[in-house]
Structures are given as structure tokens and as C-alpha cells.
Amino acid sequence: MSDTPTNVVESRASTGSFTGQTPYSAWMQTDALHSLQRTVSDHPGEHAWITHVQVSELYWMLIIKEIRTAQGFLRADNLRQAYRTLLRVVAHQEPLQAIWRSIDWMTPTDLLAILSRAVATYGKDTALQGWTYRQMVYLLGIKQPQHLEHFKPQPQRWAQLNQALSEPSLYDDVLACFSRIGMNVPKALLERDLSAPYTPSKEVEKLWRDIYADPDGNVELQQLGETLADIAEGFSQWKHRHLMATRRTFGARPAYFGTEGVAWLVPTMDEIPFPELWSARTFIGDPPPVCPHMAGRRS
Ligand code: HEM
């Protein structure tokens, strides 16, 4: 099973015409696409819920594909094309944030009317069983092996995620590329067990600090750093929208694990990709000794 199907359609000349289709419907697979919303309730808002989640799934997969493309460029030391590809990831994160608006109308009564029917139809579930999101998170370098357990009922997806866990993340490829172009990335970090959670390194923090030390030097690397920061921020913004939607529709109810759902989610807000890119900022730039907004109020 491929996680990134690329069903390249053979040309019409070799396969005959697409009977009963227009070129648009054949290419965009609109009949198949619109057959995919199977409601479980008679709540009129369930279509909005399913559309929101399915569109999110599509964008997560798109982001996975883009990150893998960027990794290919990084492995070829082509920083410029890696940067261009990662700009597209930043762009794709925008619709992921925006579509939360289309389910903000939900009250707890609305959500529970739909979820109770989903549980009755398919059994108790958790969104942690979504493999696309988890694969994206692994590619962003947040390697948490404990989440694999949710995929035991889907052995092929379990195997796919287990492999993704042990493969280089985007950040691993950035650091490996930095090492190849002569920067001081610790050898032990490059050769570590990639399936284990990442431990931030002082040497990598210093490396980012040095990249930003001269605003006019290392421009290409600074642009890459800022694009990674945009991606990390987009990821955190999605988590914030999700957390607020949970507060709004679920309150302090216990969720899948029996613990309060919000209490489970809040600590995950600190899971921010590319940690040294953030921690290095404490040491970048000539400091005003306090917050710049306070400067005028001193003396
Ligand atoms: C608005 C109603 C929603 C509520 C009340 C809610 C609740 C929760 C809760 C409590 C968790 C923690 C794990 C658990 O206990 O199951 C969770 C995780 C998650 N949910 Fe939702 N959720 C909502 C909507 C959504 C939607 C619409 C999506 C997808 C577009 C989604 C995707 C996820 C993902 C990916 C996780 C894992 C987060 C992580 O690992 O940090 N959720 N959700």
C-alpha cells in the first residue's frame, strides 16, 4: 500500500476514451470524490464536519508530499529548491487554519449528536488514529513511538508509520545538509537512533545563532530558517484552533483516554518543531536589555 498514490493515468490514446465522463470529471475524479461523504446521523451539519476533516486529510497528505520533495532537494544539497518547496508547505497551512471557521458554529449539542451516532456505527474512536497527521508530525521531527499503538487494527499503516518513525525527518535532513556544507553538526546527533524523540543540542543552537549573527550574511540559510519557523508556527496555530474548538464543543468532558480532553491537549502545545531554531533566538541580535516596548518607559 502506498501512502502517496501517484496513479498516473495512461493517455486516452492508449486506453480508449473515458466513457460517460467529461475531461474535467475524469481528471478530477469528481464522481468518486463526492461519493466519499457517508453520514452517520441526520444532523444537517454533519456534511460540514466530514468535509472539514476530509479536506484536512488531503492537505496533510499534500504537506507530506511537499516535505518529501524538499528532503530530496536537501539530500542533493540543493538549498534553493528545498526552500522553494517549503514555501509551498507554508502556503498549504493557510487553508488548514481557515477551514476551522466552517465548523465553529458547532455547540456541544451539535457535536455530540453526530459523535454519538459515529460511536454507535463504527465504535469509539480518537483522531489519534489518523495516520496522515501522524506521518506529517513524524516528518516534522516530533517522533513519539507511543502513537503507533493506535494503528494496530491497520497493520499496513502501522508498518508505514513505523518506517516513517525510523527515517530522517525534515529537520534531520536540514542538519545533515548543514554538516555536508561544512557546518559543525555533532556526529553523534547525525548518527543517533532516528526513531527516538529528538533531544535538542547546544551545538545546533549555536549553529542557528551563527547563521543569524550577521543579518547580511548567510541570507539563503536565514531564509530557510525563517521558512522552517513559519512551518512550525503554522503547525502550532492549527493545534491552537483545534484546542479552542475542543474547549468550545466539548468543555472539560473526559475524552478517549478517560482523562479530560483539554488537559490531554494543552501539554502538546509545547511540541514545537525544530527546537533549536526557537531556543537560539534568545541569543540572536544585539539586545535591548528589556522588551522594546518598555524602552521608552525607563529612567
Ligand atoms: C471540534 C470538535 C473536536 C473535539 C472535541 C476534539 C477532541 C480531541 C481530543 C480530546 C483529542 C485528544 C485525544 C483524545 O482524547 O482523543 C484530540 C486529538 C486530535 N484531534 Fe480532535 N477534536 C475535535 C475536532 C477535530 C477535527 C475536526 C480534527 C481534524 C480535522 C481533529 C484532529 C485531531 C488530531 C490530529 C488529534 C491529535 C492531536 C495531537 O496528537 O496533538 N480533531 N481531539
Image (spheres, rainbow, N blue to C red):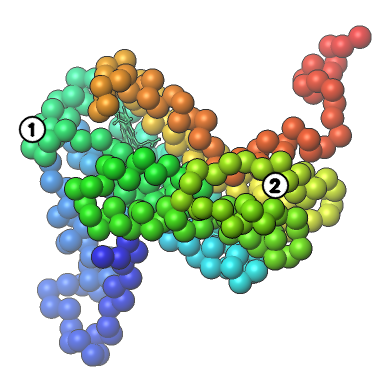
Separation of residues labelled 1 and 2 (CA atoms)? 50 Å
Confirm or deny contact between disc 1 and disc 2 (CB under 8 A).
no
Question: x and y percent of residue 294 in the render?
Answer: 79, 16
Residue 200's quadrant in the figure? Answer: top right
Residue shown at 25% from the left, 35% from the top: 126
Instruction: Name which residue lies at 70% across and 47% down.
Output: 204
Quarter where residue 292 is shown: top right
Left or right? Give the position of 19 relative to 214. Answer: left
For the N terminus, which image quadrant? bottom left
Examine the rendering and report whether any part of residue 89 can be seen: no
Q: What residue type is labelled 1?
A: Ala
Residue 202 screen position, x and y as percent? 71, 41
Q: Quadrant of the C terminus?
A: top right
Quadrant where ligand 1 appears? top left
Which sits in the foreground, 113 or 189?
189
Kind of residue indicated by mark 2: Val
The number of callouts visible is 2
Secondary structure under tag 2 reads helix
Q: Is residue 139 above or below residue 42?
A: below
Query: Is residue 9 something that shows in the picture?
Result: yes
Q: Residue 185 carries which label?
A: none
**Measured along the vertical axis of the image, is residue 66 above or below residue 196?**
below
Judge depth for marks 1 and 2 and give the one in front: 2
Extreme residue in the right direction: 299
Seen at 44% across and 37% down, the residue is 238
- Tell me where residue 160 appears, x and y as whole percent: 33, 58
Q: Mark 1 points at which residue?
A: 120
Residue 204 has which mark? 2
Left or right: 249, with 210 as reference point: left
N-terminal-most mark, 1 or 2: 1
